[in-house]
Each structure stands twice: as structure tokens, then as C-alpha cells.
Amino acid sequence: DSQQARISPPTTGPSVAVASNCCMMRLARLSGSAKNLTGPDSCRTAHPDAKRPRPDQHHGLLPAMKTLLLLRHAKSSWSEGVASDHDRPLNGRGERAAPLMGRLIRHHKLVPDIVVSSSARRAHRTADLVADACGFENDILTTADLYHASTAEWLSVVSELPDETDRALLVGHNPGIEEMILLLGGEHHRMSTAALAQLVLPIENWFDVTLIPRADLVELWRPRDVEAEGMA
């Protein structure tokens, strides 16, 4: 497919640790620097007694902010000939919904600095369609770490993002996306296919997401809501 040329090869490896390391190196190459992305410190986790940063308790009078966009893949198909869950393509509804969400991102001036997708076919096809529709012009990064990822794996991928990027779009699957919104935003929401959540984090560096900062869940959009607003 034409989108394959825009998407980096999926991460492979016998363990999450190996996959995470490969993801870190890809992100480091994109940022042009391995700062905060390599070495033993990149695998450390927050101490359970660490305090959660809050906007009114961050460094200085005004906190630094990072915007995290979490997008569930668009509607997929179990069409004949699909060998595995990982290889499921988008169906017609999904092919229409993904560009719609991309136009929404552009309309709200939320074009990301970086896009990271699950290695699943339906996820990186969603990422590609959204990127085209919103005007994202860089390469889309792909990692197996986001394929049916646990919350810990989601946090690991986010923590490895280049610090010079302030707005990131991650494309993946449920239940991980819903669990991330609950963990960071403190609210449970049902994320239908192609649903998009905007979280603003009171952090200066992406690694600080491992401290589980209290995020502001700014907005949550579903394709049917966007269609109702006349953006279809």
C-alpha cells in the first residue's frame, strides 16, 4: 500500500524491553539527539511515593505544558483472507472516519509535532489518513509497544518522546487508551473507534509523565459528533 512508504518498520523483539529500546532509538533519530532517550536512566520508573505534579505547583508561576492526543484506530474489518488480528485493515467506515478526525485536528490547530502509531495495520493506516488530512508532514513512527499495550507500556512510549516536541499524537487500541485517560485525566470515557482525546499535561519533559501528573482532559471527540458539526 502507498502508506507503507511513510511509516517506519514495526518494532520486533522477544520482549517489551527490547521493543522499547528500539522505539527509543527511533525517536532519538527523529529528534536529532539521543538526550534523555538512551542509557539506563531511560528505563527507570517513578518511585511510588513521588508526588504528582499539579499545574499550580510546577516550576515557576506558569507551568510548562505538553499536549497529548490519544486516538483510537478507526473501524476495522475481519474481511476474508485476514490472517491475524494484527493484519486487520480498515473497513469503509474507518477509511471515512480517519480523515474526518484529521480535519478536526487541523481545524482546532492541534497538528502534532510527532505521530507514533501501533504497528497494527488498522492503526498505522488510521495514522496515515489522519496525518494527510491534518497536514502533518514528518515521518510517522511505528512501534509494537502500542499494540494492545498496557498502561505501563503506554507511559513508557510517552516518556520516550523527544522533549523538543510539545504536542504528540499516539494512535493505538482499547482498553489502553481508555485506561490512560482515566489514569491521567481522572475520568472514564468510552472511546469508540476513531475517537480522539486531548490531554494537557503540566510537565516540561515527557519523562515526567511517569510521575502520573494530573492532566486536564480538554476535549474528547467522536466521529459522529464531528459529523453533526458539519465537518464531514
Image (cartoon, rainbow, N blue to C red):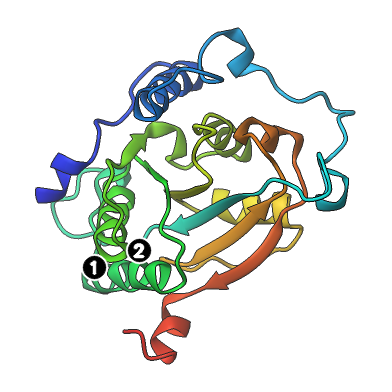
| Residue 1 visible in the picture | no
Instruction: Establish if 71 lies above or below 159.
Output: below
Mark 1 Cα-neighbour bin, 10 Å: few <14, some 14–19, many ≥20: some
Pick the front one: 30 or 47: 30
Q: According to the image, label 1 marks what residue? A: 95
SS category of the residue bearing label 1: helix
| Residue 143 visible in the picture | yes
Instruction: Indicate the position of residue 114 as horizontal and vertical percent values.
Output: 41, 44
Instruction: Indicate the position of residue 194 as horizontal and vertical percent values.
Output: 41, 66
Given the current orientation, which residue lies at the most extreme front position?
Answer: 61
Given the current orientation, which residue lies at the most extreme top position?
Answer: 40
Instruction: Indicate the position of residue 150 as horizontal and vertical percent values.
Output: 58, 39
Q: Amino acid at mark 2?
A: Ala
Instruction: Establish if 19 lies above or below 112.
Output: above
Q: How many marks?
A: 2
Q: According to the image, label 2 marks what residue? A: 74
Which residue is painted at 33% across and 37% down in the image? 141
Given the current orientation, which residue lies at the most extreme left position?
Answer: 2
Which residue is painted at 28% across and 69% down in the image? 99
Which residue is painted at 45% across and 58% down in the image? 72
Which residue is painted at 21% across and 72% down in the image? 92
**Which quarter of the rendering shows the C terminus?**
bottom left
Pick the front one: 58 or 91: 58
Q: Earlier in the sequence, mark 2 or mark 1?
A: 2
SS category of the residue bearing label 2: loop
Q: Is residue 176 left or right of residue 48?
A: left
Task: Please report contact status of discs 2 and 1: CB closer than 8 Å, yes or no.
Answer: yes
Q: Amino acid at mark 1?
A: Glu
Q: Quadrant of residue 143?
A: top left
